[in-house]
Amino acid sequence: MTGVDSGFDFSLNRVAAMVRRYWYLLRSSWPRILDLIYWPTVQMLMWGFLQMYVAQNAGFFARAGGVFIGAVLLWDMLFRGQLGFSISFLEEMWSRNLANIMMSPLRPVEFICALMIMSVVRLAIGMVPVTLLAIAFFGFNLWTLGLALAAFFVNLMLTSWSVGIFVAGLLLRNGMGAESLAWTIMFLFLPLTCVYYPVTVLPVWLQYVAWSLPPTYVFEGMRALLIEHVFRADLMMQALAFNVVLFAAASFAFLKLLGSARVQGTLLQAGE
Amino acid sequence: MDAGNTSAVSVDRLVKLYKGVAAVDGISFRLPAGTITGLLGGNGAGKTTTIAMIMGLVTPTAGSVTVLGAQMPKERYRVLHRMNFESPYVDMPTRLTVRQNLSVFAQLYAVTDIEARVAELAADLDLAEFLDRPNGKLSAGQKTRVSLAKALLNKPEVLLLDEPTASLDPDTADWVRSRLERYRRDNRATVLLASHNMNEVERLCERVIIMKRGRIEDDDTPARLLAHYGRETLEEVFLDVARGRGHQSEVAQ
């Protein structure tokens, strides 16, 4: 009835099963789909109108067209990417399904792959309409950034997945007590990664912290592109290097926390 | 009770401590292939922890668990596709339909013809009329049947059941028991059944392991347990064990 299964398999079929499951969950609730679009739209409109107002009253901002809207769109990629990952994971805990998943042949790495795919799917549902609205309302076309946008996207997604993987580990280890972290942890990145202002605004000692976070390079790169019209490939490479370290550390932490959850017996108890 | 090399499950001096307190305290037993064994015990006896260690969900503090020749939890991926479990304390997503839930799990277990297997189980477990209903809209009895279908999707050689008929009415519970009995008989599966329900254990199990405070208090066939304790039902035996009353022979002495 079932295929042969060794201990070191990676099965695309199992990843596809999990993606299918999350897709069923997503499409079963229109308020959840609406929620994916609602908040990014509100944010984009608020920052877009603020940018229009400031541009009318300050010459610098008139020249730096789209910096705020660009920043809020990239920030939403980072934030929504992590949230998409974490919410799919939380679905298992809300439905008390985690033990079923954990004693199935699904490997942790397959589970993580499925969550990463779903974070992109959820992000696409939320962000694509919002970028089109940004064109309609403010004439800001994120898609014209082309290759730069691809570099920003890859780096932001890697960071969001790393944070999502770490939070999933905490949820496995600590149960629903860690749920609030899933919703709030990324906000720590908001001031530190200098989403809306340059790194030089920060106190010198905090600049070291900022430069250790990959999204800082993305937001600096975005400002360089929109204000100076220069694509800083060096910043993207540095972001990628930090992301590789961050992703490896998060995956290591996840496996350790999963091991600890097995020792503490929290996998069976995880639920609402 | 030792089945030698034909054991499907082997538990050896198994210990699980939580913050220094023993949930399972040095138990050993073997489940011969194709047998059905009841794991009896009150709340906190260590039944669920024992089953969780057999499934590889919980890492033992000491001792070992071997399932179909694989050390758990270290080698679990060698055998997880040949096992399955059912528990009323583990649920499936409420917004997914029965068919969606079952087909996703069938894909996870690499079932070759998913549609046919889901249809077969739906017919067998009387699920056909609500296959396209969300899991959250089902009654407790219907949910249990769906969980049972999920547990049987991959035709497991080792089936672990944690109180499979808890909170079911007597008629539905009896119906579930008859299906389990038939599955075990038709597939030569090894079944470990944790339960509070003495009638269930008496009807289904050829062997009963009674646990108390993490230890095995007794391990025998239902008939021999009744004889040992001089009782007519397993419920009376269970009460004797729970209240610290020994075998009839010990009492006489």
Image (cartoon, coloured by chain):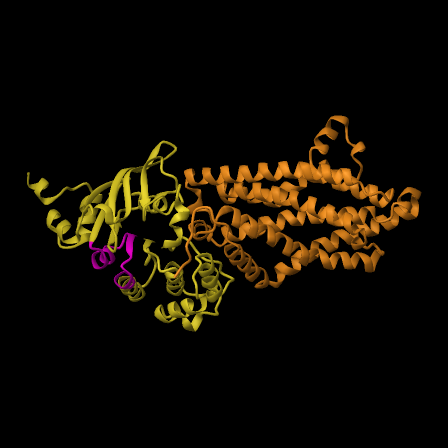
Chain colours: A orange, B yellow
Residue B162 is at least partly visible in this image: no
**Is residue B198 magenta-colored?**
yes
At 52% from the left edge and 62% from the top edge, which residue is drawn? B95
Where residue B224 appears, as percent x and y from the top left, is: 13, 50
Where residue A174 appears, as percent x and y from the top left, is: 49, 40
Q: Is residue A236 above or below residue A15?
A: above
Which quadrant holds residue A163? top right
Please state the extent of the stretch shown in magenta in the rendering.
B183-206
At 45% from the left edge and 49% from the top edge, which residue is drawn? A102
Left/right placement of residue A178 relative to residue B14 reads: right
Left/right placement of residue B44 relative to residue A78 reads: left
Q: Is residue A10 above or below residue A23?
A: above
Q: Looking at this view, is B234 or B107 the one in front?
A: B107
Q: Is residue B81 above or below residue A263?
A: below
Where residue A213 appears, as percent x and y from the top left, is: 69, 36
Residue B64 is at least partly visible in this image: yes
